[in-house]
Image (cartoon, rainbow, N blue to C red):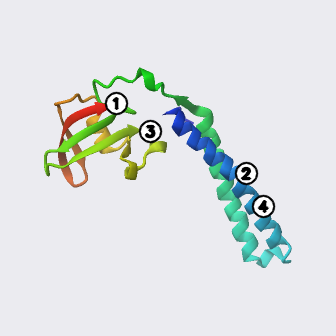
Amino acid sequence: MATTYMTAEGLQKLKDELQFLEGTERPRVIAAIAEAREKGDLSENAEYDAAKEEQGHLESKIALLKGKIMDARIIDETSINTNEVQILTRVRVKNRNNGQEKWYQLVTEGEANIMEGKIAVTTPIAKGLLGKKVGELAQVHVPAGVIEFEILEITL
């Protein structure tokens, strides 16, 4: 598994999700399997099959989360320079095509949440903004064409 860079907050979210899956979801699925098993013939028991399938998905997700947590590397937020757009910075941009201003924060894929303005550094918009400074223009290639952003402000 590849090293994943994230904030301490992002790592904590992964740990919280893992704890929920292991502490709440795993016992629920085990109980569902036990209940289905009590209903008799397992060869024709759809509830048992569904519970076993859910258990397989759950265990896969738990293993994936454990791997991400083990391979995670914390990004030191104090070492981030706000002279240019980089991971963890918040950037205010003006869309030169329609005049709208927006804030984006560039984060790791695991922390992305478009409703909070957090976009993954692997997205086309983030890739186009990375390395830009206040006053510079970024041409971002998106499926609908090219969007030109003016960098207005960079903060943490």
Q: Which amino acid does label 4 sit on?
A: Ile
Q: What residue does disc 1 label?
A: 86
Label 3: state its secondary structure. Answer: loop
Q: How far is disc 4 from disc 1 in space, using C-alphas? A: 44 Å
Q: Residue 108 carries which label?
A: 3
- Quarter holding the C terminus is top left
For the residue pair 18 and 153, the one nearer the viewer reads as 153
Q: Residue 9 carries which label?
A: none
Circle count: 4
Label 1: state its secondary structure. Answer: loop
Number of residues whose C-alpha sits closer than 10 Å to that of mark 3, classed few (under 14), some (14–19) or many (20 or more): some
Q: Which of marks 2 and 1 is nearer the N terminus?
A: 2
Q: What residue does disc 4 label?
A: 30
Residue 45 position, x and y percent, is 77, 77
Query: Which residue is drawn at the image coordinates 62% and 41% (left, top)?
Result: 15
Q: What residue does disc 2 label?
A: 23
Q: How far is disc 4 from disc 2 in space, using C-alphas? A: 11 Å
User: Do labels 4 and 3 touch, CB within 8 Å?
Assistant: no
Q: Earlier in the sequence, mark 4 or mark 3?
A: 4
Q: How far is disc 2 from disc 1 in space, using C-alphas? A: 36 Å
Between label 2 and label 3, give the one nearer the viewer.
2
Q: Earlier in the sequence, mark 1 or mark 3?
A: 1
User: Do labels 1 and 3 touch, CB within 8 Å?
Assistant: no
Label 2: state its secondary structure. Answer: helix
Query: Which residue is drawn at the image coordinates 45% and 43% (left, top)?
Result: 109
Query: Which residue is drawn at the image coordinates 28% and 31% (left, top)?
Result: 154
Q: How far is disc 4 from disc 3 in space, using C-alphas? A: 33 Å
Q: How far is disc 1 from disc 3 in space, using C-alphas? A: 11 Å
